[in-house]
């Protein structure tokens, strides 16, 4: 008998990056269309990092009713607003400054100066957000996702706060804000975008069942992982 449990990882492999990006853009637009048809708005959580940049660029010319899109972020770095390393800076540059999403519907995470204050402020913002329709996530080479890092509390308990303040990020800068795993998991659809050779080991560890931060993520409809097929091959080194 076929399993009806949707709470599982579904790995989708793509021979090249363009095919992966095509699939991601199609999935985002498809989620937007269903959410807007069913609930009149689209709540989207964005990943930072390098992997999604080209996907965001492609969305600039997508046919969409931008007036109904509501944008949230999965994590942010605490650093001055001019810094290019901010996730919000990358997304604005690649996509959001090119489409007419009403500014009040773009909910950036305050970028500091203190992670705990910024986390508190964003928890307030999320209070009005409800369930997310789609959450996009990346995978770091150490297995982190959003800013949930190995060795830290990932906020998996159902009563975890919606946001976590991080003071010891192993990646610059040390202070960050992340949505907790519990909050990210309150998403109708969750998609990981995984590309780049540096992710090889993290992918292997994830598939071997190791307890990396990405494993804290599981929505009621499971998790789709869009991955470059080379990352599924046995490691050479
Ligand atoms: O630090 C971060 O890294 C992850 C992965 O980024 P990538 O550059 O390896 O794609 C990202 O998902 C997260 O938002 C970001 O803050």
Image (cartoon, rainbow, N blue to C red):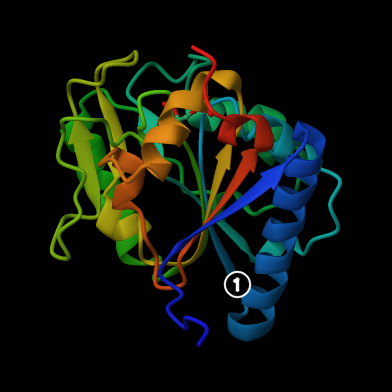
**Is residue 206 left or right of 100 when viewed as pictured?**
left
The residue carrying pointer 1 sits among few (fewer than 14), some (14 to 19) or many (20 or more) residues within 10 Å by Cα, namely some
**Is residue 60 left or right of 230 when viewed as pictured?**
right
- Residue 68 visible in the current orientation: yes
Task: Determine which quarter of the picture holds residue 117.
Answer: top left
**x then y, percent, for residue 175:** 24, 22
Q: Which residue is mark 1?
A: 41
Q: Is residue 232 above or below residue 215?
A: above
Q: Residue at x 68, y 57 (%)?
A: 28
Q: Is residue 2 above or below residue 109?
A: below
Q: Is residue 36 above or below residue 18?
A: below
- Residue 100 visible in the current orientation: no
Badge 1 marks a residue whose secondary structure is loop
**x then y, percent, for residue 17:** 75, 33
Task: Determine which quarter of the picture holds residue 146.
Answer: top left
Tally the numbered discs.
1
**x then y, percent, for residue 178:** 31, 40
**x then y, percent, for residue 116:** 16, 35
Q: Is mark 1 within 8 Å of ligand 1?
A: no
Q: Residue at x 50, y 26 (%)?
A: 199
Q: Residue at x 80, y 42 (%)?
A: 19
Task: Determine which quarter of the picture holds residue 202.
Answer: top left
**Is residue 142 left or right of 195 when viewed as pictured?**
left
**229 and 58: which is toward the camera:** 229
Q: Is residue 58 above or below residue 132?
A: above
């Amino acid at each position: 008998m076929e399993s009806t449990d949707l709470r599982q990882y579904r790995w989708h492999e793509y021979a090249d990056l363009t095919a992966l990006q095509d699939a991601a853009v199609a999935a985002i637009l498809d989620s937007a269309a269903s959410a807007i048809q069913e609930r009149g708005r689209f709540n989207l959580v964005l990943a930072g990092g390098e992997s999604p940049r080209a996907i965001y660029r492609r969305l600039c010319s997508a046919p969409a009713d931008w007036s109904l899109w509501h944008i949230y972020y999965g994590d942010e770095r605490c650093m001055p607003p001019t810094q290019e390393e901010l996730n919000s800076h990358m997304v604005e540059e690649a996509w959001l400054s090119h489409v007419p999403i009403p500014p009040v519907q773009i909910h950036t995470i305050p970028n500091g100066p203190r992670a705990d204050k910024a986390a508190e402020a964003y928890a307030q913002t999320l209070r009005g957000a409800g369930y997310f329709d789609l959450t996009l996530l990346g995978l770091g080479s150490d297995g982190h996702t959003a800013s949930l890092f190995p060795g830290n509390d990932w906020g998996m308990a159902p009563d975890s706060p919606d946001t976590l303040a991080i003071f010891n990020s192993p990646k610059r800068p040390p202070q960050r804000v992340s949505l907790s795993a519990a909050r990210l998991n309150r998403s109708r659809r969750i998609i990981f975008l995984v590309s780049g050779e540096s992710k090889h080991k993290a992918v292997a560890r994830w598939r071997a069942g190791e307890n990396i931060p990405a494993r804290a993520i599981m929505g009621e409809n499971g998790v789709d992982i869009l991955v470059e097929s080379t990352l599924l091959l046995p490691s050479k080194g």
